[in-house]
Image (tube, rainbow, N blue to C red):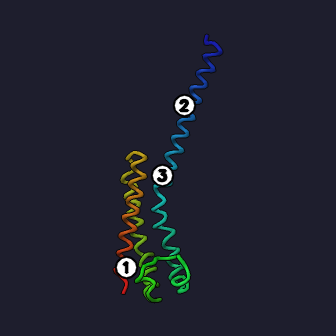
Amino acid sequence: MASADSICFNRAIVSLSVSLKDVEEEGIVMIWLIGLLPTALFLVFMPVLETVIAQKDRYRTQSVYGFRSTRAVKNPENWRKAQLAVRDSSFVFGGIQLVFTLLICSWSEDLFLIANAVFLGVLLGIQFFYVNSRLD
């Protein structure tokens, strides 16, 4: 028969391994939440925000909201065109970000997060130049 000490020790080891597995699963969930955040930004937040902002000229002159460049704030027509271009391009870039996120999911956690952040920066830069090219 096993002694009481060995039974307690075995229970502690099993408990520790279950706890470590829970922490690892929570970490993976957190990594995925952070990884999918740029996709949510492009697919949900930006289109809704830009639609609301495009309807009111007061955001052009009295706020920091919306797509802002020298061309975009030049006149109300450019302002509206810029906000709608951001809205429309956000759906495309959100889809690209989602595909990229799913393609790199097998990478290590650190590399996954770094690649997602770099790719988000690249997409935002491309979006900036794309929207500016559509303005007068």
Report how far apart the C-alphas of labels 2 and 1 lie in the structure: 54 Å
Q: Work out whether 99 lies above or below 13.
A: below
Give the number of the mark in front: 2 or 1: 1
Name the image quarter holding residue 82. bottom left
Give the number of the disc on residue 59: none
Please provide percent x and percent y for residue 100.
37, 58
Give the number of the disc on residue 132: 1
* Amino acid type at image mark 2: Ser
Q: In this view, does 15 lie to the left or right of 36?
A: right
Report how far apart the C-alphas of labels 3 and 2 lie in the structure: 23 Å
Give the number of the disc on residue 17: 2
Quick one: quadrant of the C terminus? bottom left
Q: Is residue 106 left or right of residue 22?
A: left
Please rate how many residues cluster around mark 2, counting C-alpha atoms within 10 Å: few if below 14, some from 14 to 19, many from 20: few
* Amino acid type at image mark 3: Trp
Mark 2: secondary structure? helix
First in sequence, mark 3 or 2: give its number. Answer: 2
* Residue topped by disc 3: 32
Mark 1: secondary structure? helix
Please provide percent x and percent y for residue 24.
51, 40
Q: In this view, does 27 lie to the left or right of 7?
A: left
First in sequence, mark 3 or 1: give its number. Answer: 3
Give the number of the mark in front: 3 or 1: 1
* Amino acid type at image mark 1: Asn
Please rate how many residues cluster around mark 1, counting C-alpha atoms within 10 Å: few if below 14, some from 14 to 19, many from 20: many
